[in-house]
Amino acid sequence: MSQDSIPQSYLKYKICVSGSADTTSAAPGAYEKTVEVGREIVRQGGILVSGATTGAPYWAAIGAKQEGGISIGISPAATELAHVKSYRLPTDYFDMIIYTGFDYSGRNLILTRASDAVITVCGRIGTLNEFTIAFEDNKPQGILTGTGGMADMIKDIVERAHKGNGKVVYDSNPKRLVAKVIEMIKKEKVEIKDAQKYRRKNGSG
């Protein structure tokens, strides 16, 4: 193997779907679009990551499993018992649930940082919290517009915040949105490979 060559990576893209557990503010058709986002993440070679909760993230998990993909949940609870009994959260449609014990605010930080990108669907204040964490981390993000709640407010919030546009794309079509997000992830992976090549070339890897 040459010094500049990098072994093939088998890591799949981890895409978080962030959205409201209480979907009363969701627009008509949000369910169908969110399920399709879950499907598209799998179709386009990704793994779904979510907050292991009800509502929009759960809808995405349904879509991911319908497509035969992998669905990982990151829970605010410390144990499976607390997840089910205290938080009243589901365990179906997940291949794995990681129990953080950090409640919702701490879970949100782990959730976004464990993901390569975040897609926002409908949502309330918790969804906005996940968006702003990812925004400050300069993480690729996609907003599924037309789904109601925060998803239809974020563009205006970003413009009013005067901190730049971040790595954020908007689309009302699930397939196009996931494709845009994955394209941003791919660009970041190129930077990682370049860093790996530099490390190996300079004898630090």
Image (tube, helix red, strand yellow):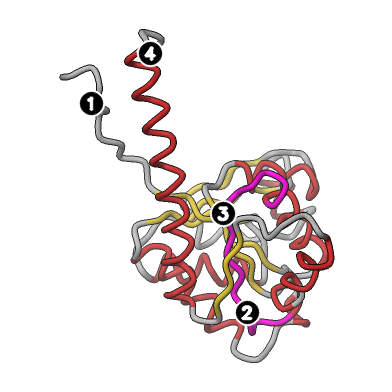
Q: Which residue in the protein does label 2 denote?
A: 145
Q: Dot 1: within a 10 Å radius of its alpha carbon, few (fewer than 14), some, or many (20 or more) residues? A: few
Disc 4 + disc 3, Cβ < 8 Å: no
Q: Number of marks in the image?
A: 4
Between the C-alphas of marks 2 and 1, the distance is 41 Å
User: Between 185 and 166, which is closer to the camera in this rendering?
Assistant: 166
Q: Is residue 83 magenta?
A: no
The percent coordinates of residue 166 (x first, y second) are 65, 55
Q: Is residue 143 magenta?
A: yes
Q: Quadrant of residue 3?
A: top left
Residue at (65% x, 41% y) in the render? 99
Q: Which residue in the protein does label 1 denote?
A: 5
Q: At label 4, which amino acid type do we have?
A: Gly
In magenta, the rendered stretch is 135-148
Q: Which residue in the protein does label 4 denote?
A: 205
Residue at (43% x, 58% y) in the render? 182
Disc 1 + disc 3, Cβ < 8 Å: no
The percent coordinates of residue 95 (x first, y second) are 46, 52
Q: Reading the chain from its start, which is encountered first: label 3 or label 2?
A: 3
Q: Under tag 4, what secondary structure?
A: loop
Q: Under tag 1, what secondary structure?
A: loop
Q: Reading the chain from its start, which is encountered first: label 4 or label 2?
A: 2
The percent coordinates of residue 108 (x first, y second) are 72, 49
Q: Quadrant of the C terminus?
A: top left
Q: At label 2, which amino acid type do we have?
A: Thr
Q: Reading the chain from its start, which is encountered first: label 4 or label 3?
A: 3
